[in-house]
Image (cartoon, rainbow, N blue to C red):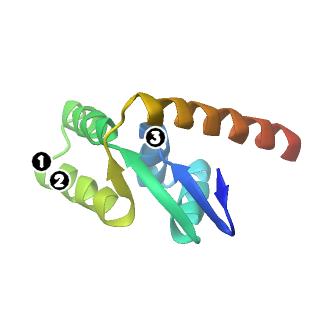
């Protein structure tokens, strides 16, 4: 989804995990986060990330710091029916453009 030169992006659980791992895909996420974009994270993602890392025996302190970082560099939003639909459409548009790129 584009508005002028600013992209509005929704970052999901998978993308945040790749970001924290520092993988190639995570580097792409980092570029989006540092670019001139409006970055949103659905609130459920925070719960999913906390569950994953706690399940992997990461300390609560580290998990909390990661959640705080997400909240600092993105806008955490609650999802309703309208937003779910818009997110689905934005995802399909992203996939379409990704196929055209490579």
Residue at 25% from the left image edge and 34% from the top image edge:
56
Is residue 22 placed above or below 56 in the rendered structure?
Answer: below
Judge depth for marks 1 and 3 and give the one in front. 3
Q: Position of residue 35 (x, y in %)?
A: 58, 70
Q: Position of residue 12 (x, y in %)?
A: 46, 40
**Nearer to the camera, 39 or 32:** 39
Judge depth for marks 2 and 3 and give the one in front. 3
Mark 2 or mark 3: which comes first in sequence? 3
Q: Quadrant of residue 75?
A: bottom left
Q: Is residue 89 left or right of residue 59?
A: right
As measured in the structure, the alpha-carbon distance from the residue carrying label 2 to the one carrying label 3 is: 18 Å
Which residue is farthest front? 82
As measured in the structure, the alpha-carbon distance from the residue carrying label 1 to the one carrying label 3 is: 21 Å
Q: Is residue 5 left or right of residue 78?
A: right
**Nearer to the camera, 1 or 74:** 1
Task: Identify the residue under disc 2.
Answer: 64
Task: Identify the residue under disc 1.
Answer: 60
Q: Position of residue 16 (x, y in %)?
A: 43, 47
Mark 1 touching mark 2, by CB under 8 A? yes
As measured in the structure, the alpha-carbon distance from the residue carrying label 1 to the one carrying label 2 is: 6 Å
Q: Secondary structure at mark 1?
A: helix
Residue at 23% from the left image edge and 32% from the top image edge:
51
* Quarter of the figure with the C terminus: top right
Q: Position of residue 7 (x, y in %)?
A: 62, 60
How would you rate the neighbour count of disc 3 (Cα within 10 Å): few for under 14, some for 14-19, many for 20 or more? some
The label number, if any, that marks residue 12 in the structure image: 3
């Amino acid at each position: 989804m584009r508005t002028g030169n600013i992209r509005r992006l929704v970052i999901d659980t998978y993308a945040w995990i790749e970001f924290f791992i520092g993988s190639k895909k995570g580097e792409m996420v980092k570029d989006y986060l540092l670019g001139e974009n409006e970055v949103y994270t659905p609130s459920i993602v925070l719960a999913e990330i906390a569950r994953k890392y706690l399940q992997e025996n990461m300390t609560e302190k580290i998990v909390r710091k990661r959640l705080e970082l997400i909240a600092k560099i993105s806008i955490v939003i609650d999802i309703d029916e309208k937003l779910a639909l818009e997110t689905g459409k934005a995802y399909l548009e992203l996939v379409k453009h990704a196929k055209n790129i490579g």
